[in-house]
Amino acid sequence: MIPLRLSLQNFLSYQQALLDFRGLHTACICGANGSGKSSLLEAISWALWGQSRATSEDDVIHTGMSEARVDFIFQMHQQVYRVIRTRQRGQATVLDLQVATAQVAPSHNQTPIPTLDMGESTSIISAKELSSHQCPVEDLTQQLTFRSLTLRGLRATQQLILDRLRLDYDTFVNSAYLRQGRADEFMLKRPSERKQILATLLKLDQYDELAERARDLTRQRRAAIEVLEQQYESVGNALQREADIADERLSWENKLVMLQRQQEADDQQWQALQARQQQRQQWQQQLAWQQQQQAVVEQECDRLRQELEVVQQHYQQLDALLQQESVILVAYQQLQALQAEDDELTAKFHAHQQAWEQRQALLEEQAALTGELQAQLRRLEAQREVQLQQQQELRQILEKAPTIADALAKLHQARDRLQQLDDLQAMVTPLWQRRQQLHTHLALVQARLSARLDELRLAADHYHQQYAHQAQLQQAALDVAERLDYLEQRRRYQEQLREKGIERRSFMDQLQAHQRDYEAQLGALDQKVQFLQQPDAVCPLCDRPLDQHHWNLVLQKHKAAQQEIQNQLWVVREQLVTSEREIQVLRREYKELERELQPYAAMWERRGQLQQELQRSIDSFQQWQRLQAEQAELTHALEQNEFAQDIREELAALEQQLATITAQKGSYDEKDHALVRGEVERWRWAEIKQAELKQTQLRLNQLIAQQPELEATIAHLEKELATVKASPLQQQLDALNRYLEELGYDRQHHITVQTALRQAQPWQLRYQELQQAQQQAPHLQQQIADLESRLHQRTTDLAAIRDHIAHLRQSLADNADDEEHLARLAQQRQQRRAEMDTAIAHLGRLQQQQHHLDNLRQQYSTLHTQLQTLRHQQR
């Protein structure tokens, strides 16, 4: 541990101190006895372990202060740590452990050395010299960023500090820190305590950790041996079935040869019947196709007849329309004349509408201008009337000036008297108020002391009751600690079981993936074999026909591949069964451990509760002693009235000061003061009226000055209003009126023309239909001729199809149907093929079992070797 920075606040004899140890190897602190040399070293031990030379926890707080705080930063194992311990008087201690987020380089010039407190005038420590010299101590906290490691509870955080330091307080004060007057403390300890200190310094506890790790490895090997022994026994039992499997395989091979010979005879008969049946099926297919063609041709003939009839009707309608050509042309010419006249009237309408809108806009603009001038004129006239009325009212107010002057003189007299009384009140009132405050404060102090005395009695009884249960709590804490040690061992073993289960599960997932691949390959091979069993089967690779020899070669190749995959699939399934059995064993043991470890979290919580209760019990005893002393002091102070002496002295001084003021200035009467204050309020209106007179005179002068300008503005507006009717707007209105008269648009005549045009609109459609009829008539004549020719051709084809159908029916009647015979033979072949598949499956399974037994024989030897190795490792 290398110290870097120490900050003290209200700790022992220090109110504020900052030390920066960086860059130093050895430092010497010199000073007289009691100057605080040892307090610096005590601050380090109190920050790290919470212990010091103080007899009680509150004694570390500087006299007269309520809180002590020590902030210590040190480096250890290339890592910077920060410990902050705070203590408030009468409350619990707060501990915070932090670590720097970035590592720092090791300090080559700093080496942890023993610290000796000589007590007289010198202390040698690994730190900077303590003097008035100011160091940049804040730079370290600004350069580093700390992350909190504080745990829940003071004891948990303290234990974390001990785990990081690997050094307890007793070892520290007997090795690195030799306290003042206690250099022989190590030699005065009992042999067991000295042994424990030396063991901590030499890190002998590592041997205990190695022993625990050895026990964990032994348990792991024992569990692995149990699993391997089960596997070893299972493999030995499986190897005993090898002779039975060989006999069963020979029996199935003989049966398979016999079934293959019977299958070859059935195949020859099947091929002959299949050829005859294929020829009959071809005739049936041709008959069905000819019947379909007959139906198609008959439908096409019916469609041609219907289409010919529709085209002939359409041609008749067009011919009737062509006969009305002259009437349609005359009506169409009249329609065009009406459209031309309507276009001319529409243009006049738009011009008339535009001029009319411009005329309306000019009228509105003229009316707006006239209205604005009239409004301004009315507003100015009203303003003139208001100003005249205001001038009359202001002159009436100025006539009251003499009365206001008399009242103002009386107001000044009353204010002089009020000022005298205010001065006397300013001298007396603070003294009266302070006297009342002191009496109240004295009563409050006495009541507070009485209440504090009652609280001390209740608190002392409470702490005494808490301390009475300390022995039971210590025994319960020991029992919980022993149980937790056992559960922690079982938890570590459970974690090992879980890891092994995960490994087995991963292996099973791989086996299942292999199993799915093999099953997919078997399915593909089964489809190929079924395809080869069909008549006229071709090669699956080149799609060429196969003779009997090549067909047998391809079939044997596929069946050999099936057999090989079946063997591999059987091995995978056996491994899956074995792995599943191992997982079941691990799962049962894991569940048993899970049930055994259910109270683990509750035990940890119970342990923390007991530790807190023990600490509270110890704290309660110390608090009870402190409260007893404070209770005796308060009782004596209340009985002898020896409290708040400063308040009693200040009361006597206030009474003497009030008597002196009364003799010099006279007595102060609150009623006379109130009467004079009312007199001032009664005449204050004169001061307000005087100010109003000044404002009134100014306002009257302003109104008289504004009168000529207002009259001139009104005369100007009247002149502008008279000249509006001769403006350019009126000239534009006259020009628009003349243009509308010259345009001569007649709205009624326009409506009449539009009505006639709507009535003549149907002749537009009739004219278009006439043009379409003139274009379509020649095409319809050609279409009628084509339809008649196609109908004659399809009738001839229908007669030829009917003759071919009659010939096919005669051929089918002359050849018998072998379908039932083929069905019986197919069922017989399928049954025999099923028997062959069963035989092949049994042979494949037996071959897989033999192959698996060969593997098991090797595995049996491997398991034997592994068992010997694990037993040796366990020993």
Image (cartoon, helix red, strand yellow):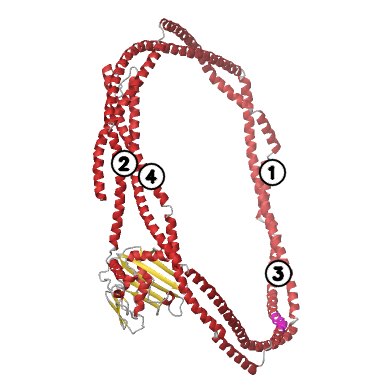
Amino acid tagged 2: Gln
Report the residue marked by disc 1: 741
Residue 376 colored in magenta in the image: no
Q: Main secondary structure of the magenta part?
A: helix
Question: How far apart are the two marked residues, 3 and 2, measured between alpha carbons?
Answer: 127 Å
Q: Quadrant of residue 265?
A: top left
Residue sitting nearer the eye, 606 or 770:
606
Judged from the image, the secondary structure of the residue bearing numbered disc 3 is helix
Residue sitting nearer the eye, 759 or 23:
23
Q: Position of residue 783 (x, y in %)?
A: 51, 16
Report the residue marked by disc 2: 230
800 vs 775: above or below: above
Q: Quadrant of residue 72?
A: bottom left
Amino acid tagged 3: Glu
Report the residue marked by disc 3: 711
Foreground mark, 2 or 1, reads: 2
Span of residues in magenta: 678-690
Question: How far apart are the two marked residues, 4 and 2, measured between alpha carbons?
Answer: 16 Å
Amino acid tagged 4: Arg
Mark 4 or 3, nearer chain start: 4
Judged from the image, the secondary structure of the residue bearing numbered disc 1 is helix
Foreground mark, 3 or 1, reads: 3
Report the residue marked by disc 4: 587
